[in-house]
Image (cartoon, helix red, strand yellow):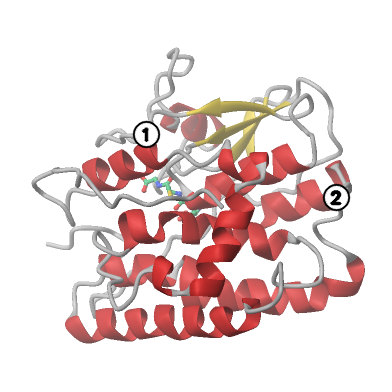
Amino acid sequence: MKPSRELSDTGRFVRQPNRFTDRLGPPEPGRYRLYASYACPWAQRVLIVRSLLGLQDLLDVTIVDPVRDEKGWRVPGGDPEYLSELYHASDPGYTGRYTVPCVWDTKDNRIVTNDFPQITLDLETSWGTSPNLYPERLRPDIAIMNDRLYHGLNNAVYEAGFARDQQVYEEAVARVFTTLDFLEVRLAGSEFLFDTLTDSDVRLYTTLARFDTVYHAHFKCSIRRLIDYSALWAYARRLYAVPAFRETTDFDQIKRHYYLSQTTINPSRIVPVGPDLDWSL
Ligand SMILES: N[C@@H](CCC(=O)N[C@@H](CS)C(=O)NCC(=O)O)C(=O)O
């Protein structure tokens, strides 16, 4: 039996396509609500961008419980009880996973988008432009960088962690560390991936923040640790010093989510005690 619908016949993790891909219209206070988890790297991206751009009054947020059971994400306060109810209200025939981040439209009573790569770009282009996280002059380069980050790191750690085949796992892990090696060189002597803080830094940060705490052991990305990369580790801590990054980084929820929810990888549901990391500058 396949442990997941997202496992190919060759033991490869293949992420499901995003079902809701409408674009976010202009902001309307009180209309849109983001459902996010502090544990989830794709959701944390949106929380960081919302905070950097000062969109707290324009985009409401509900943070779901970090530990997911077989019914999916639970909503504290119970309205609705589970995120799945919003997916079924939007599409009664929905059969996919109920994922965060997603944006609920309280006017039309439907999920507008669970298209995680697009949500931050929509916020950066039509909701807030100060600071400019997606400058026009850099967009082609940001697109190339984001693609490299996704295939080489953000999603590659999941491909390594969920692999059910040794070779598939080894290929994904090699990609992770080739990408970290490339980033280490790129960030030596430079503050950000480009000459200013951009969408790409947000995407890189959320994977780095989880690297030593969960991906190293739980996803077996264990050739090196983040702290072994001096430029990358310094870069990650510099970003962590910024409130939008630090205040949306919850190591305890991250650990509890991965180790308690992903039971095919961690059947004992033991949450490790370490690692003891000092994220201060
Ligand atoms: N929308 C993307 C990315 C978002 C995503 O993977 N979110 C995870 C948490 S990090 C989630 O909500 N998973 C719910 C589940 O697997 O049931 C996807 O479909 O994979």
Where residue 79 appears, as percent x and y from the top left, is 48, 14
Image location (x, y in percent) of residue 262:
24, 49
Quadrant of the image for the N terminus? bottom left
Q: Is residue 159 left or right of 49 when viewed as pictured?
A: left
Where in the figure is residue 184, as x and y percent of width and height? 55, 79
3D distance between C-alphas at marks 2 and 1 = 30 Å
At mark 2, the secondary structure is loop
Q: Please tell me how crowded label 2 is: few (under 14), some (14-19), or many (20+) other residues with Cα within 10 Å.
A: some
**Any part of residue 115 in sight:** no
**In the image, farthest residue toward the front:** 281
- Residue at x-position 64% and y-position 57%: 202
Confirm if mark 1 falls within 8 A of ligand 1. Answer: no
The amino acid type found where label 1 is placed reads: Pro
Q: Which kind of residue does numbered mark 2 sit on?
A: Pro
Looking at the image, residue 87 lies above or below residue 126 = above
Q: Nearer the viewer, mark 2 or mark 1?
A: 2
Where residue 192 sits, quadrant-wise, is bottom right
- Please tell me the numbered disc located at residue 66: 1
Up-down: is 182 above or below 128? below
Q: Quadrant of residue 171?
A: bottom left
Residue appearing at x 91%, y 73% in the figure = 137
Q: Earlier in the sequence, mark 2 or mark 1?
A: 1
Circle on res. 214: none
Disc 1 crowd, CA 10 A, few/some/many (<14, 14-19, 20+): many
Residue at 71% of width from left, 39% of height from top? 50
Q: Secondary structure at mark 1?
A: loop
Q: Residue 172 versus residue 185: which sits nearer the camera? A: 185
The reply, left or right, for residue 122 in relation to residue 71 is right
Label 1 near label 2: C-beta < 8 Å?
no
| Image spot of residue 117 (x, y percent) | 63, 58
Q: Which residue is mark 2?
A: 131
